[in-house]
Amino acid sequence: MYPDKKITIAIDGYSSCGKSTLAKALAKRLGYIFIDSGAMYRGITLYCMRHQLILDGKPLIEKIEKILPQIKLTFIYNSSSEKHDLYLNDEDVEELIRMPDVASNVSPIATIKSVREKLVAEQQKMGEYGGIVMDGRDIGSIVFPNAELKLFVTASPEIRAERRLKELTQKGIDTTFKIVLANLLERDLIDSTRKESPLIQTKDALFIDTSNLTQAAQLQLSLKYANQVLESYSDKTNC
Ligand code: CDP
């Protein structure tokens, strides 16, 4: 539609609010790359769990800082899921990083400054030419502060927990609504109160509450916003 301009779209929000589903659909419609930045934090968490670098839920920060250069994260496109799967040191860990034990440990790991610096640098490199939709917690504030479109997505905690429970149950993971809700509330608290790049809604982000919106409606609304931005560039070109 506006072939020359490829914008950057930053989607932030609370855990399990449907950001990744929306980001993936939006990227597909626009022909952009979709990157789930949370997968990268989950990948580092899995590595730390495997190497006993988390003790009673507390990350061993100094040790983690030392081993960070040994962690190689790569995204490889999976044509059946139409998204990029995460590889940790060349091992496909896409399924493992979605497990509840990783979800329980990821937010403390994501508070570590050196972890964030490593991942933010990699994320910025992935987006240096635009044409990307990235979702996470600090995408509009830190990773791409100049993104042409920023969305801040949320939904009520109960709805988010129901959606995540459904996803986990479909994968055959045995858990309960109560456990899932407790995990997402705990992560919301850590993510929004941490010192290093906490989850915030930036002033220029558009707010979307997905509680009562179908996935199709969320996509339509976001596409409308994206097209408005793209149209503003085509107007500039025509002047
Ligand atoms: O899918 P869900 O919303 O449950 O979470 P996620 O996007 O996979 O992110 C997992 C965790 O990684 C979050 O709870 C944050 O602690 C951390 N994260 C972050 O700090 N910054 C990001 N840009 C993305 C994720």
Image (spheres, rainbow, N blue to C red):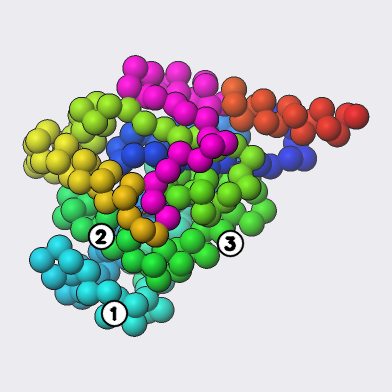
Residue 111 drawn above or below residue 152 = below
Residue at x 51% of width, y 54% of height: 142
Which label was assigned to residue 62? Answer: 1
From the top left corner, tell me how far across and down residue 113 is, in percent.
39, 67
Q: Quadrant of residue 65?
A: bottom left
Q: Which residue is mark 3?
A: 125
Numbered range of the magenta stretch: 197-223
Q: Tags 1 and 3 in contact by the CB under 8 Å rule?
A: no
From the top left corner, tell me how far across and down residue 27 is, in percent.
54, 38
Which label was assigned to residue 108? Answer: 2
Q: Quadrant of residue 153?
A: top left
Q: Amino acid at mark 1?
A: Glu
Q: Is residue 72 left or right of residue 2?
A: left
Residue 50 at least partly seen? no
Q: Amino acid at mark 3?
A: Lys
User: How far is the residue under mark 3 from the one under mark 2?
Assistant: 25 Å
Q: Is residue 188 left or right of residue 137?
A: left
Viewer-nearest residue: 177 or 73 = 177
Q: Amino acid at mark 2?
A: Pro
Residue at x 45% of width, y 35% of height: 152
Q: Is mark 3 within 8 Å of ligand 1?
A: no
Mark toward the viewer: 1 or 3:
1
Q: Earlier in the sequence, mark 1 or mark 3?
A: 1
